[in-house]
Image: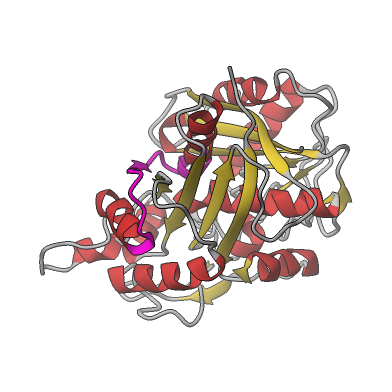
């Protein structure tokens, strides 16, 4: 038996600011990516780096701590018995580039440190499943509440722009020199971003800010097509399966899709293929990565929380960077916001190793 699950409160921090500032940046249609050259690189890349944090050009533990300090500004008082689900791919990856030990801020350490910082004694689990990490963590939190394991869960997702990760994507030739252009026919790669998000789930309707509208995760799916270590399955089989699970039994038509939309040639083609196989006429689609970049393990949670803003507004935000869609593409938001078809939105992510996750969010 699945119990009631409610999304009580949440916030994000991106290169555009907190939730309200990031939403405003998306509505403006202007990217928050800035061309910057990190130490050790000959080339500058458009990056979504959070301003005014220490060690601006390094994925350091000190920078990670400063990110959490700003991210948790609006965190309500949370009961000590609340469990934590932490999602990240690399944490403070650049600590590994230094010879001094012990290393700090690594994925297996962050959950323990956050529990200590927030005085949580309900235990913690770290989810590191590539770019689908925080979507999977959000699904796991819903399962914990839905099956009665606990009545409240805090989900946190975080990743930094680091020399380590930038070097990896540069080696794969996966970075755009001009900036991420999701679903554009001239797209040429992704733009890395950094950021974090937190979301509090509960089995009771008790939003700390007393908003009248309450939202719930009403369906989800996780798959792994295991086609390739980095490339997506060209026919979208894994994403099709994850989305089909998520929308099975939906009360109404899906109102819109906050897609993964990285701006790489193969990811975006795979997503469009999957959506057009699932629906004769897919719901309207957007991607936020042209504004804030690809935040890796934090992307899914950031995008899910932005999807809640879409539900409040009744629209999908513009897909910044999209100028010329592929021929015969579904309806994509482009330079203008577009209305949702209903009060539900699908947020989905796909990661290295063929991991796919999708969650349907609806007004309760």
- Left or right, 292 with respect to 314, comes to left
Q: Quadrant of the N terminus?
A: top right
Residue in view at x 84 percent, y 28 percent? 253
- Left or right, 29 with respect to 141, comes to right
Q: Is residue 181 above or below residue 6?
A: below
Query: What percent of the width, then of the height, locates residue 173?
Result: 44, 52
Residue in view at x 25 percent, y 54 percent? 109
| Most foreground residue, 162 or 51 | 51
Magenta residue check for 205: no
Q: Is residue 133 above or below residue 248?
A: below
Query: What percent of the width, then of the height, locates residue 291?
Result: 65, 63
Q: Quadrant of residue 248?
A: top right
| Most foreground residue, 255 or 112 | 112
Residue in view at x 48 percent, y 63 percent? 194
Residue in view at x 66 percent, y 20 percent? 244
Q: Is residue 57 above or below residue 314?
A: below
Residue segment shown in magenta: 117-136
Q: Is residue 76 above or below residue 267?
A: below
Q: Quadrant of the C terminus?
A: top right
Disc count in the image?
A: 0
Magenta residue check for 124: yes
Query: What percent of the width, then of the height, locates residue 30?
Result: 73, 70
Residue 187 visible in the picture: no
| Most foreground residue, 69 or 301 | 69
For the rendered model, the colour scheme is secondary structure
Query: What percent of the width, then of the height, locates residue 190?
Result: 54, 54
Residue 364 visible in the picture: yes
């Amino acid at each position: 038996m699945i119990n009631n699950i409610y999304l009580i409160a949440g916030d994000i921090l991106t290169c555009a600011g907190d939730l309200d500032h990031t939403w405003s940046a998306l509505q403006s249609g202007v990217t928050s990516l800035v061309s910057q050259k990190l130490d050790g690189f000959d080339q500058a890349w458009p990056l979504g780096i959070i301003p005014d944090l220490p060690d601006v050009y390094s994925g350091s533990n000190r920078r990670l701590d400063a990110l959490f300090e700003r991210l948790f500004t609006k965190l309500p008082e949370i009961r000590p018995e609340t469990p934590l689900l932490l999602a990240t791919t690399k944490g403070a990856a650049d600590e590994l580039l230094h010879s001094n030990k012990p290393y700090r801020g690594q994925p297996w350490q962050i959950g323990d440190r956050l529990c200590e910082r927030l005085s949580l004694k309900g235990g913690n689990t770290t989810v590191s499943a590539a770019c689908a990490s925080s979507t999977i963590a959000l699904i796991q939190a819903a399962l914990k509440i839905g099956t009665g394991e606990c009545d409240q869960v805090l989900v946190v997702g975080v990743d930094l722009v680091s020399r380590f990760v930038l070097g990896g994507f540069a080696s794969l030739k996966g970075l755009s020199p001009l900036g991420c252009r999701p679903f554009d026919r001239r797209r040429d790669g992704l733009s890395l971003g950094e950021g974090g998000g937190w979301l509090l789930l509960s089995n009771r309707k008790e939003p700390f800010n007393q908003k009248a509208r309450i939202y719930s995760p009403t369906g989800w799916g996780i798959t792994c097509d295991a086609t390739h270590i980095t490339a997506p399955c060209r026919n979208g089989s894994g994403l099709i399966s994850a989305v089909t699970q998520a929308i099975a039994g939906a009360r109404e038509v899906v109102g819109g899709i906050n897609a993964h939309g990285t701006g790489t040639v193969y990811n975006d083609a795979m997503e469009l293929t999957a959506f057009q196989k699932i629906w004769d006429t897919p719901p309207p689609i957007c991607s936020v990565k042209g504004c804030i970049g690809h935040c890796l393990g934090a992307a899914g949670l950031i995008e899910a929380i932005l999807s809640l803003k879409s539900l409040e507004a009744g629209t999908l935000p513009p897909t910044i960077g999209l100028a010329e869609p592929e021929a015969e593409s579904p309806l994509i938001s482009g330079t203008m916001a577009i209305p949702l078809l209903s009060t539900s939105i699908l947020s989905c992510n796909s990661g290295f190793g063929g991991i796919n996750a999708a969650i349907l969010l609806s007004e309760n």
